[in-house]
Amino acid sequence: MNILVGDVGGTKTRLAIVRHDVRGVQYGDEVTLPSGEYPGLADLVKASGLLGEHRFDAVCFGVAGPVRDNRCRVTNLPWTVDGTELAADLASPTVTIINDLEAVGWGIDALSPEQLLCLQQGDVDPRGNQSIVAPGTGLGEAFRVPADGRYVTCPSEGSHADFSPADERECLLQRWFAERYGHVSWERFVSGPGIATLHRFIVEHEGKEVGAPLAEAMTQGDASSAIVAAARQSSDVASLDAVAWFLGLFGAEAGNHALKVMATGGVFLAGGIPPKLADLLPTSPFLSRFNNKGRMTGLMGRMPVHAILDERVALRGAAVCALTAKETGS
């Protein structure tokens, strides 16, 4: 059985061929392409070179955006991904479209201990709900609930809820951003572009200077990556501040989400950013902001928190989803 799976994000799309036979699940050819360089997902898949002579028994894509009726308007791309149209374009009997965080949820149970970084041991409830928070190009959120002996993932768009400042500085940040762009959501700060936004606020509003090497690096490539690199080298005060602030806000919103879904079964940090900042997370303000929930602080401290280090977890989850759908006929 041949399956084509994909993790479709605002910055890049990762595709892979999965084979399932008597030996189990095997991952074959894999390609990563820049999403924004293609007019749509069908064009990107055809350009990947993976189609070739393959005939796929099933196709499943985890897509960054709200999914309804097997169709998704991608949040950070001018794409609409339609499973029915893709099935015709790719000559596949079925194309399943799921939210990218739902794909992560499908993949969590396949992770090994080495693919997880424990930030808080907690006291896991084996029947408790689980939270998934995933910063990347945007901020994904989902939760898992136990049902019939397994976990079912429920996608959400909670990252677009109103940002809630915790102190005077964050009130100023909210006002500064609202004056420029209107609605202020958590995704605006807890995401890759959010790191650059926080740095810009620190420079423009608080008057900290940017050195010439960093300014050049920010214009030549990804600004947020340049800021993180400068923070690692301790070569720019505003960068150190921005990255620490980002990790604190990440912790605050991860805690908000965990509290809302009562994630006593565990909290999983997914997306492209946690693996890249895994060395910074343990000593950052993340955990203090996560746990600081007033009268619920004790409850928060008992929730296990792990960062997912495997950036292919959504691909693996899409494969599990496709196989499950085939086996159950759903």
Image: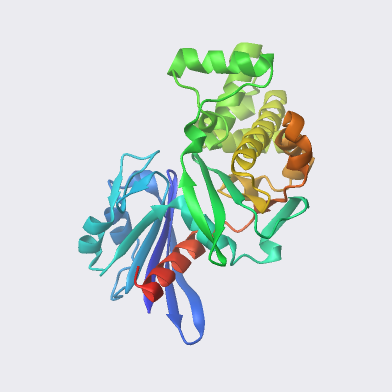
Q: Which residue is drawn at 32% across and 59% down?
A: 45
Q: Is 136 positioned to the left or the right of 203 in the image? A: left
Query: Residue shown at 42%/72% (left/top)?
Result: 323
176 over 64 or under it: above or below? above
Residue nearest the observer in this picture, 33 or 128: 128
Q: Residue placed farthest to the bottom in the image?
A: 22
The residue lying toward the viewer, choosing from 128 and 189, is 128
Which quarter of the rendered picture does the N terminus lie within? bottom left
In this view, 301 is above or below 149? above
Q: Where is residue 264 in the image (x, y as percent from the top left)?
A: 68, 50
The number of numbered badges drawn on the structure is: 0
Which quadrant would residue 146 be assigned to in this image?
bottom right
Residue 177 locus on image (x, y percent): 51, 18
Res 46 quadrant in image: bottom left
In the picture, measured across the screen, residue 114 lies left or right of residue 324, that is right
Can you say whether 3 is above or below 210 in the image?
A: below
Place of residue 222 in the rendered image (x, y in percent of width and height, measured from the top left)? 52, 37
Q: Is residue 98 left or right of residue 210?
A: left
